[in-house]
Amino acid sequence: MSAYLEASIFSALPWATHGFGTRQPAPSTTGVSTLKQIHSSLVLLADHPGLLGEGDALITNQSGLAIAIRTADCYPILLADSRNRAVAAIHAGWRGTAEQIVIKTIEKMSSRFGTNPNDISGAIGPGIGVCCYEVGEDVSSSFGFAIRTHLDLALENWKQLESAGVPTENIEALDVCTFCDAERFFSYRREKDNAGRMTSFIRIEPEIKPR
């Protein structure tokens, strides 16, 4: 089993490498920016490696710098701006999703890098599926429901990508449930405090200059 899953939506972007984490130990890498994740909608600019502070999304246009987030049921979402060569890594749990973290990330990419949503490709990685994510009214009310229900976080984030202006054909969801697939993925809901975390990343590759 591979340490990473990949989204085909990024196959046309040879300048960006990425991976959605699994239970397999990720290869050690240098030059990675990370966050202390707090289930928020805070978006930070990554301009150097290391722990950059509290938040749940990172954006960068620095070549060679990987940005990474960690999940175990929440959704990892990766974005790439093909025109300006800028990327984002988002940790979207129910709180961040309710606070529209995807939309806020794209807004910050637009203000910092001049990103046009039409130029964004976005991939929604493995997370807890609607099949297994039953929530009470305290959570469902944040999404317009008045009863206990099964919440589709992948769909909610897909709708945010579309609402922000990302073309539907530029969006991909891997459509795998972390709770269902115990062989490949950690799940906090299934394993509680024993659950590990899976690291997902995206990186702008340095340009190879001709001799």
Image (spheres, grey):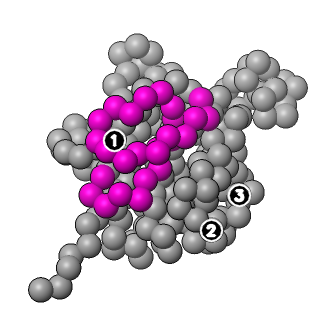
Q: Is residue 136 found left or right of 123 in the rendered image? A: right
Disc 2 secondary structure class:
loop
Q: Residue furthest bottom?
A: 211
Residue shown at the point (23%, 46%) measured from the top left: 31
Q: Nearer the viewer, mark 3 or mark 2?
A: 2
On screen, 26 above or below 164?
Answer: above
Quadrant for the C terminus in the image: bottom left
Residue shown at the point (43%, 53%) measured from the top left: 60
Mark 2 and mark 1 residues within 8 Å of each other at the beta carbon: no
Amino acid marked by disc 2: Asn
- Image x and y of residue 123, in percent: 51, 57
Q: Which residue is mark 3?
A: 164
Q: Which residue is mark 2?
A: 116
State which region is magenta.
40-65
Residue shown at the point (50%, 40%) measured from the top left: 44
Mark 1 and mark 3 residues within 8 Å of each other at the beta carbon: no
Q: Which residue is mark 1?
A: 33
- Image x and y of residue 57, in percent: 51, 41
Q: CA distance from mark 1 to mark 3?
A: 25 Å
Disc 1 secondary structure class:
strand
Instruction: From the viewer's side, name the closer residue of 150 and 117.
Output: 117
Q: Earlier in the sequence, mark 3 or mark 2?
A: 2
Q: CA distance from mark 3 to mark 2?
A: 10 Å
- Image x and y of residue 204, in percent: 34, 62
Amino acid marked by disc 1: Ser
- Image x and y of residue 119, in percent: 57, 71
Within-10-Å neighbours for mark 3: few <14, some 14–19, many 20+: some
